[in-house]
Amino acid sequence: MKKRILILITFNLSLLTLFAQPIDKIVAVVGSNIIMLSEVEAQYLQILSQGYAEDPTIKCDLLEELLFQKLLVNQARLDSVEVSDDQVEEELDRRLRYFIGQIGSEEKLEEYYKKSIVEIKDDFRELIKDQLLAQNMQYKITGEIKVTPADVRNYFSKIPADSLPYINVELEIGRIVKKPMISKKEKDEAKARAEELRQRILDGAKFETMAKLYSEDPGSAQAGGELGFFGRGNMVPEFEALAFSLQGKEISEVFETEYGFHFLQVIERRGEQVNARHILITPKTSENDLTSSKIFLDSVYDLLKKDSLTFAEAAEKFSDDEADKKNGGMVTNAQTGSTKFEMDQLSSIDPTLFLTIDKMEVGEFSKPIITSAADGKQAYSIILLKSRTEPHKANLRDDYQKIQGAASTMKESNLVREWIEKKIAITYVRIDDAYLNCDFNNPWIKKTN
């Protein structure tokens, strides 16, 4: 943690922070903004809860992050940077949903904190506003940063040869996906099964027991179909519309979503949060449906082999994966935002994909193979291996994007450091004597002759 350049942390307040008992002592002042000892201690407890060993220098790092935030807030107010009330309320609601998800329910949150949801929001509204002001102020400082190829080359040239990072094997892959069409017969059978289960519950069977036995939602079945509290925008529209319209313990009619056929029961509603249970029955894919997908992709494969169209053209025209087809069929790594994957990251696409890729040459595309999505649904896909790098030390040719990102971070860090030093020089800053021995990265403690 030590000696890092401080760029604004977006405080994701944990339950430890939320429930910390205030210690009424000011440990720092920045302009008209104060930092309480309780803020530092709560963040310290959060760090320890993540497995870090006790270390007093961590408190110095945390205080410096808070000093930076307060400096941003102070300057934001001087520069008339604004945050709307709607933005504050939206962020408050988002964080409360997270807290409620951690602790289990609004009732448990209120019980633990000994305050109502309205009172909790009142307590944290000003803090959330300050954090949003700080974010907007930092964007004002760094939002227009651009890194030129010359910047990237200059950054890379200054890295000592023995300090260059080692890069694992990386792959770029494309795919053309053909999902099997679900026949009307299979849909009718799934819907009839859901109707049957619903009727058994209406006739007296326990919803929770039936969900454990028959629901095909792996995320909720073992919990008796219970989903936990959720707000608007967290579920698919059809599910959400019913969840927020049902009264009491009413059981919904069977309805269809992209996942299959459901029916649900609201357990509890508190404000704009609903806890519901549901049962899901998914239409089965028949061998005939899968075979039809394969036959279709066989014809696409033949077109590719004859160079009748490019892989990108085929993906745009024929693929059922909306995200990939807009990117020339190339798959995006959700963890990094780039199109490069390390071998162990391929499982996020399909656990069996490695077996196909491992035998392919760069530029080669596979015959149609069965692939499985994260939800377990099968489809046929044509896979393209666009590139593969061998394990190597970082270089500009193979790792330009990574080096560009590092160069951008360094440029942003330097700009932020310069801004901090400039603003500290003209801003009132006072720090409690207990922290005067901290080895800060920036000159928060002004030296006197």
Image (cartoon, grey):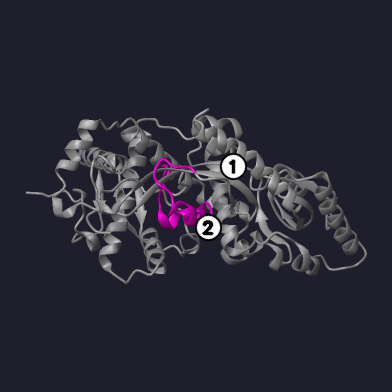
Furthest residue toward left? 449
What is the three-letter code of the residue carrying label 1? Val
For numbered disc 1, what is the local secondary structure?
A: strand
At 63% from the left edge and 56% from the top edge, which residue is drawn? 376
Nearer to me, 48 or 106: 48
In the rendering, at what x and y percent does residue 438 appear?
21, 60
Which quarter of the figure has residue 43? bottom left
Chain part drawn in magenta:
336-365
Nearer to me, 249 or 260: 260
Circle 1 residues within 10 Å: few <14, some 14–19, many ≥20:
many
In the rendering, at what x and y percent does residue 90 appear?
56, 42
Residue denoted by label 1 = 177
Position of residue 370 in the picture relative to residue 141 (left or right): right
Circle 2 residues within 10 Å: few <14, some 14–19, many ≥20:
few
Furthest residue toward right? 203
Q: Does the magenta stretch include residue 394?
A: no
The reply to whether residue 18 is in sight is yes
Position of residue 443 in the picture relative to residue 231 (left or right): left
For numbered disc 2, what is the local secondary structure?
A: loop
Q: In which quarter of the image is the N terminus?
A: bottom left
Q: First in sequence: mark 1 or mark 2?
A: 1
Which quarter of the figure has residue 411? top left
Furthest residue toward bottom? 53
Q: Does the magenta stretch include residue 338?
A: yes
Position of residue 82 in the picture relative to residue 377 (left or right): left
In the rendering, at what x and y percent does residue 342 appear?
39, 53
In the rendering, at what x and y percent does residue 331 appear?
48, 42
The reply to whether residue 250 is in sight is no
Find residue 352 and name its label. 2
What is the three-letter code of the residue carrying label 2? Thr
At 79% from the left edge and 45% from the top edge, which residue is drawn? 183
